[in-house]
């Protein structure tokens, strides 16, 4: 539960109080860019020092490993591959994609304040790039969002997704 002073802008309002937002107006979600404090945050997490905030009320962003699974009716493999390659070009943090004629898996790193923000951006990725990358009209059937520490712990223990190598677009 968030406590705030009367008149404060509700969290998630994008700087516009709900009362002033036009009916039907939606706020666009995009990837969170690396801020000037990003390097400091990484050092603090590596050493275990510091907190989740930097300065007064400024929340640091974290890296989240995303695995997005999509599926739908069959499409020509050549078109699926070309669409995923265009998505990788449009979304430069894409690590690897695996595909077949009726499903695909996309893995990448996203920078966001928390899991909720990372998941929201991930859930919009396929739809937002569907026309620009000419992706198949598939729907999202799975989403995994884990923090960097959990990802590395899974790899070290020998379970979880295999390391994203080789980078690129590959058939299943």
Image (tube, helix red, strand yellow):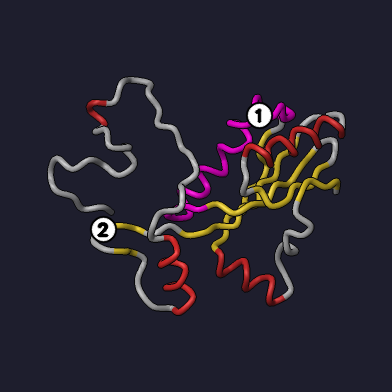
Q: Is residue 9 left or right of residue 142?
A: left
Residue 33: x and y in percent read 46, 48
Residue to which mark 1 is pinned = 130
The percent coordinates of residue 135 (x first, y second) are: 72, 30
Which numbered disc flags the more N-terminal residue, 1 or 2? 2
Q: Which residue is mark 2?
A: 57
Q: Residue at x 68, y 37 (%)?
A: 87
In the image, is 140 to the left or to the right of 34?
right
Number of marks drawn: 2
Please, which residue is most extreme toward the front here? 36
Residue 42, position as x, y percentages in the image: 47, 68
Apparent side of residue 120 relative to residue 88 in the rendered image (left or right): left
> Above or below — where is 96 with respect to 63?
above
Q: Quadrant of the N terminus?
A: bottom left
Q: Which mark is residue 163?
A: none
Q: Which element type, helix, strand or loop, lies under badge 2? A: loop
Q: Quadrant of residue 124?
A: top right
Q: Quadrant of residue 77?
A: top right
Residue 104, magenta (yes or no): no
**Quarter where residue 86 is shown:** top right
Q: Could you tell me how far apart the alpha carbons at marks 1 and 2 are, in whole angstroms?
A: 37 Å
Tell me if mark 2 has few (under 14), some (14-19) or many (20+) residues whose alpha carbon lies within 10 angstroms of its own: few
Residue at 58% in and 68% down: 150
Q: Is residue 133 magenta?
A: yes
The segment highlighted magenta reads 111-137
The image shows residue 56, relative to residue 127, as above or below, that is: below
Q: Which residue is at 71% across, 40% downward? A: 70
């Amino acid at each position: 539960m968030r406590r705030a002073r009367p008149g404060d802008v509700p969290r998630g309002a994008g700087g516009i109080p709900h009362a002033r937002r036009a009916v039907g107006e939606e706020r666009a979600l995009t990837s969170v860019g690396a801020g000037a404090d990003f390097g400091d945050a990484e050092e603090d997490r590596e050493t275990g020092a510091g907190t989740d905030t930097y300065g007064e009320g400024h929340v640091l962003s974290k890296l989240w490993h995303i695995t997005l699974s999509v599926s739908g009716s069959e499409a020509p493999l050549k078109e699926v591959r070309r669409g995923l390659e265009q998505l990788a070009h449009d979304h430069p943090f894409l690590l690897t994609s695996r595909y077949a004629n009726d499903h695909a898996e996309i893995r990448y790193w996203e920078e966001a304040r928390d899991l909720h923000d990372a998941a929201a951006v991930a859930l919009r990725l396929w739809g937002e790039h569907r026309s620009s990358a000419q992706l198949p009209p598939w729907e999202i059937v799975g989403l995994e969002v884990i923090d960097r520490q959990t990802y590395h712990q899974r790899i070290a223990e020998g379970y979880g997704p295999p390391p994203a190598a080789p980078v690129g677009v590959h058939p299943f």
